[in-house]
Image: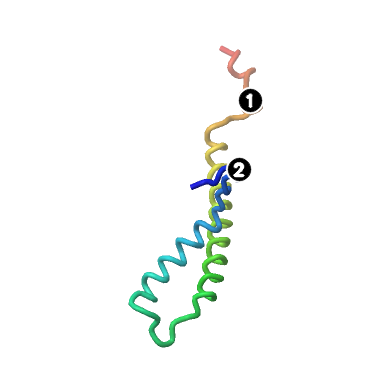
C-alpha cells in the first residue's frame, strides 16, 4: 500500500529480475533448511543481480538487432525506386 505523501516506487527491472532469480534459486536449494555446503545467501543475492544485469543487457542488444532487421524489411528508401524506368513504356 502506498503511504499518503510518498511517491510510488519506480519499477526497477534489474531488481525485479534479480529477485525472481534469487527466489527460484532459494526455493530449489534452501527448501527445508540450509543443507551443508549451501552457498551464502548474500553471495547468491549478489550473483542474482549480476545475472539479471547481464540478461537484460543482452536482451536489449538482441531486441535492438531484431528491431533493426524488421525496420529494414518494413521500410524502403525512395532512392531505390527507378522512376525513369517506370515512365518508359
Q: Position of residue 86 (x, y in %)?
A: 58, 17
Quadrant of image for the C terminus: top right
| The quadrant where residue 25 appears | bottom left
Secondary element at tag 1: helix
| The quadrant where residue 8 appears | top right
Q: Position of residue 64 (x, y in %)?
A: 58, 47
Q: Position of residue 74 (x, y in %)?
A: 53, 33
Report the residue marked by disc 1. 78
Q: Position of residue 88 (x, y in %)?
A: 59, 13
Q: CA distance from mark 2 to mark 1?
A: 54 Å
Q: Pick whichever, 75 or 60, lies toward us.
A: 60
Secondary element at tag 2: loop
Q: Residues within 10 Å of mark 1 (few under 14, many from 20)?
A: few
- Would residue 84 be found to the left or right of residue 22 on screen? right
Q: How many marks?
A: 2
- Residue furthest front in the image: 4
Q: Is residue 23 above or below residue 58?
A: below
Residue in view at x 52 percent, y 70 percent: 45
Q: Which mark is residue 5?
A: 2
- Residue furthest right in the image: 79
Q: Residues within 10 Å of mark 2 (few under 14, many from 20)?
A: few
Residue in view at x 56 percent, y 37 percent: 71
Display colour scheme: rainbow
Which one is in front in this view, the residue at disc 2 or the one at disc 1?
A: 2
Amino acid at each position: 500500500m502506498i503511504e499518503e505523501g510518498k511517491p510510488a516506487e519506480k519499477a526497477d527491472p534489474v531488481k525485479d529480475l534479480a529477485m525472481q532469480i534469487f527466489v527460484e534459486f532459494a526455493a530449489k536449494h534452501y527448501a527445508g533448511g540450509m543443507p551443508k555446503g549451501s552457498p551464502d545467501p548474500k553471495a547468491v543475492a549478489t550473483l542474482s543481480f549480476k545475472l539479471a544485469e547481464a540478461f537484460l543487457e543482452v536482451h536489449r542488444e538482441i531486441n535492438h538487432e531484431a528491431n533493426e532487421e524488421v525496420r529494414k524489411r518494413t521500410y524502403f528508401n525512395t532512392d531505390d525506386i527507378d522512376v525513369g524506368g517506370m515512365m518508359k513504356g
